[in-house]
Amino acid sequence: MRRALLVVVVTVCLVPPAVAGEIWLSITEPRQGASVVGEVDIVAEVLAVDEIAAVVFSVDGRPVGTLDSPPYRLPVDLGPDNIGHRITLVARDRSGAEVTDTVTTQPYPISGEVKVELQQLYVTADSDRDPETRLAREDFAVFDDGARQDIVTFASGDIPFTAVLLIDSSASMSGRRIQAARAGGDAFVAGMADLDQTKVMVFSDQLLSTTPFTNSTQTLSAGLRAATARGGTALNDHLYAAVKLLEHRQGRRVVVILSDGIDTHSVLSMAQVREKALKSQVLIYWIRLSRHLGDLPGDQGLNITSAWRSSRQYRRQLELLKRTVSDSGGRIIGVDSPSDIHPVFVDVLDELRGQYAIGYYPSDSANDGRWHDVRVEVKAPGVKVRTHSGYVDH
């Protein structure tokens, strides 16, 4: 009997209400279409305005448990049979409002065939920093571990995305800086298309404000304004959390970081975050603030120490963050003045609007957990392309 242990942490928090009694519920494990047998943990993320009274868990129409406080993680034995299941959760708040979410699992494949999943690349093409949006399918060549691949899907233009705006609100962001950060976030939110969704996470050494994934500009703008600048910086921990949340979203997934990148309080190392980010194939943009908006020394001259890390380790953390952003297919955009923050957010959104989506079935896929290097080339002279550096074959 194959046994799977699936664990997700569920967060309950207050979000700026659009309507009283609003609840947001999402089953995060097992994922839709997953194959599971035996003992599993059923978990969901819940966001609510009013206090949650109960979350009721059911499998195949049969109640299997109720939890009235977080974390909402319920161990369940699905039995040894290789069959699919329908898992339903109902979250109810103190006012009586409730919401339901359902996922359906599938049996494990029993044939000897290996399932080859479509690999989706999101490619940015530019020339002299200007987006190149007129390329066709035949202009691109995709290489997987050095072998050229057949492109089976191709799209360009306004492709929907799911994004996390990860806004540093530590003490160094006080005054004009946090105001400019809010204005930049508002510009990004205002430019979203109908099918785009964004989640705001404002952090320092703790999570200060968050919203659900939503297209509501009112909710997202309220999330940007809900916190004041205070405390230290735990960028690693919150970037890991953002990537983890995006793992369960479909399509193009993006993290936009606004921070100087100097992490003083995280428990996780950037090496751990990098591993998670590369496996998740999340596109990362880093709007990098000069530490004092104008007088940050070169990274090699960075001389910060703490109980957590030495100066050398801080420099190593910064280097790994830069490599992670580059390998994700995103980029680092330096900002020296608060007035530059707003247009940079607009530039990131414009770049996302101009990306190409290229799909292919890897010619050498074995579902063996091996890392595959990916390279994209383009025929057009003077045009450079960026995409994520590879993926894990699973």
Image (tube, grey):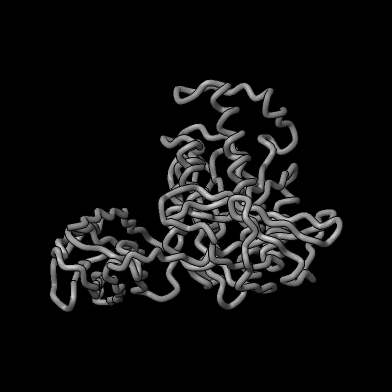
- Establish if 208 lies above or below 45: above
* Left/right of residue 77 with respect to residue 155 in the rendered view: left
Where residue 350 appears, as percent x and y from the top left, is 72, 65
Residue 336 visible? The answer is yes
Residue at the spot x=78%, y=58% of the render?
A: 126
Residue at the spot x=86%, y=58% of the render?
A: 381
Residue at the spot x=72%, y=45% of the render?
A: 335
- Establish if 284 lies above or below 64: above
Quadrant location of the N terminus in the rendered image: bottom left
Where residue 209 appears, as percent x and y from the top left, is 46, 54
Quadrant location of the C terminus in the rendered image: bottom left
Q: Total of numbered circles in the picture?
A: 0
Task: Tell me the quarter of the picture where residue 187 sits.
Answer: bottom right
Q: Residue lying furthest front in this view? A: 112
Q: Nearer the viewer, residue 267 or 78?
A: 78
Residue at the spot x=54%, y=61% of the render?
A: 363
Q: Nearer the viewer, residue 64 or 140?
A: 140
Q: Nearer the viewer, residue 114 or 166?
A: 114
Where residue 332 appears, as percent x and y from the top left, is 68, 46
Q: Nearer the viewer, residue 279 or 213?
A: 279
Where residue 359 appears, as percent x and y from the top left, is 59, 68
Task: Tell me the quarter of the picture where residue 44 sits.
Answer: bottom left
- Establish if 153 lies above or below 9: below
* Left/right of residue 281 with respect to residue 35 in the rendered view: right
Residue 176 visible? The answer is no
